[in-house]
Image (tube, rainbow, N blue to C red):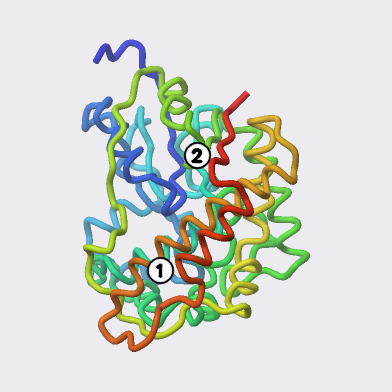
Amino acid sequence: MDERVLRDRCGFLHIPKTAGSSVREALTALFSEEQVSRYRFDDVLFGPFAAFDTFDPSLRASVLLPSDEVTEPPARLVAGHLSLQGMRRLVEPADMFTVLREPRARLLSHQLFWAVQPANYAAFGEYQVQRLSLDGLRPFLERSEAAHQTDNLICRMLASGNGVIPRDRAMSASERKVAAEAAIETIETLGLTTYVESPTMWGDVSTFVGAPLEPVTANVTSSNDHPAPFAGPQFDFAMLELLEERTAADAQVFRYVVSSRTGCTAAEAAQFADFHFVAQVERYARVAMQAERASEPATVLTNSGARSWRRRVGSRFTLRAK
């Protein structure tokens, strides 16, 4: 690969479960190891947690806290779960890009990934929010201890530094409105914002980086992983309402990006989002129904029911960038 075509600086703001591990792997193939920043996290992803000294030393070294001095020279590639607030200490917004995903689908994927692919929890010391995913979807969404991960995470990462966003609880309706507006303002300052569901995603990122990326697949949750430990129905109308609330601000941001990038109407963007949400529900059901303790279906939205909903929102619904 001719390195001269690459951007001098590239920042990838990696929102969890947006194909970011695949994108990072493709990016690091273009840059030498010494050109890649060691910073992978900042404090926003951990909410009110403060005991970072309990992290494994190598993990702690990858976390950039507000009180930390940046102790590395400017890196050509910064790629990780750093919020806008942390990223801006390392790279300018115009040199950053991010990838979105339909927010309800992203949140389902987030909880399921933590449940069926247990991470190295010990490395995170006293931060053990990942374990809350093991109790099932609704408890995970309801627990205030997990709100910094489950409540409108796209907005939390893109609008970080905005004093209206609480770290220890879910946002109120008025706070969600402010957060969504701030996140959309942020998007307009970034070099690129694309989304997983776009057929041009890899091309968009390649153009921004300045060199072709080789698409890879990494960290994909599948039914071949460790069986989900939660049992019983995971979906009912109350849970679906809660899921909508936990992604309400993120939904505004996602649909804004889809509409502005494709020229579709707001109604078409909502239909597009519904289609991809249903596809993730089907996938969630296939994985969750392998639960070791499950004595009944793990979702009340059956595959046939999901297919019926998919037919209503369009079985071949694809939006292409303008």
Q: Give the label on residue 285, or none.
A: 1
Identify the residue at image location x=45%, y=82%. Answer: 233
Residue 265, placed above or below residue 111? above
Q: Secondary structure at mark 2?
A: strand
The one nearer the camera, 256 or 70, is 256
To which quarter of the image does residue 128 belong?
A: bottom left
How many numbered dots are placed on residues in this image?
2
Q: Give the residue at mark 2.
A: 98
Q: Residues within 10 Å of mark 2 (few under 14, many from 20)?
A: many
- Give the alpha-carbon distance from disc 2 to disc 1, as whole Å: 28 Å
Residue 211, placed above or below residue 214? above
Place of residue 94 in the rendered image (x, y in percent of width and height, measured from the top left): 56, 28
Earlier-in-chain disc, 2 versus 1:
2
Q: Secondary structure at mark 1?
A: helix
Identify the residue at image location x=69%, y=55%. Answer: 179
Q: Amino acid at mark 2?
A: Thr
Between circles 2 and 1, the one closer to the viewer is 1
The one nearer the camera, 156 or 247, is 247
Tell me the quarter of the image containing the N terminus: top left
Place of residue 297 in the rendered image (x, y in percent of width and height, measured from the top left): 40, 80
Residue 278, placed above or below residue 3? below
